[in-house]
Image (cartoon, rainbow, N blue to C red):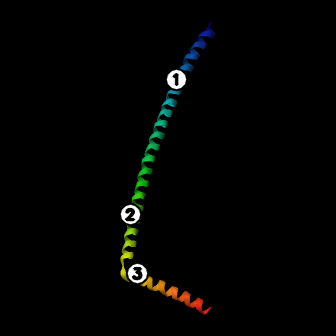
Amino acid sequence: MERLESSKIFRRFLISYLVILIIPMVAGFISYQVSINTAEKYATINSRQVLNQSKKILEQSLDEIDRFVLQLSLDRDLNILLKKKAFEKKTDCHYSHAIG
């Protein structure tokens, strides 16, 4: 009989200790999950912001290059110079073939 009572007391203490140990574990698991979800959400938001900023910078650079190319194509002196050099190359090519 005494053994049965000590067994009941032991079980009560064991259950109370297990409950005391399980509560922090469950709370820790829940806070871990919340932290992971929050970190993932902010990482996604930050990555999108960085990608959008990079996209804007690339678009600005491409626009600047387009304006520069347009400006060069409208420059008469440059066009004349390029045509002159192309003509000279053709003449040099024909001249070297004629000699060779």
32 up-or-down from 52: above or below: above
| Residue 76 left/right relative to 31 | left
- Which type of secondary structure does the marked residue at label 3 adopt? helix
Q: Amino acid at mark 3?
A: Asn
Q: Nearer the viewer, residue 18 or 40?
A: 40
Q: CA distance from mark 2 to mark 3?
A: 26 Å
| Residue 55 left/right relative to 26 | left
Q: Quadrant of the C terminus?
A: bottom right
- Which type of secondary structure does the marked residue at label 2 adopt? helix
Residue 5: x and y, percent?
59, 10
How would you rate the neighbour count of disc 3 (Cα within 10 Å): few for under 14, some for 14-19, many for 20 or more?
Answer: few
Q: Amino acid at mark 1?
A: Val
Contact flag, marks 2 and 3 (Cβ < 8 Å): no
The residue at which mark 2 appears reads as 60
88 up-or-down from 38: above or below: below
Q: Residue furthest front?
A: 98
Q: Residue furthest bottom?
A: 99
Q: Amino acid at mark 2?
A: Gln
Q: Nearer the viewer, residue 58 or 49?
A: 58
How would you rate the neighbour count of disc 1 (Cα within 10 Å): few for under 14, some for 14-19, many for 20 or more?
Answer: few
Residue 91: x and y, percent?
52, 88
Q: Nearer the viewer, residue 67 or 46?
A: 67
How would you rate the neighbour count of disc 2 (Cα within 10 Å): few for under 14, some for 14-19, many for 20 or more?
Answer: few
In the rendered structure, find residue 19 and report the number of the disc placed on it.
Answer: 1
In the rendered structure, find residue 79 and report the number of the disc placed on it.
Answer: 3
Q: CA distance from mark 2 to mark 1?
A: 62 Å
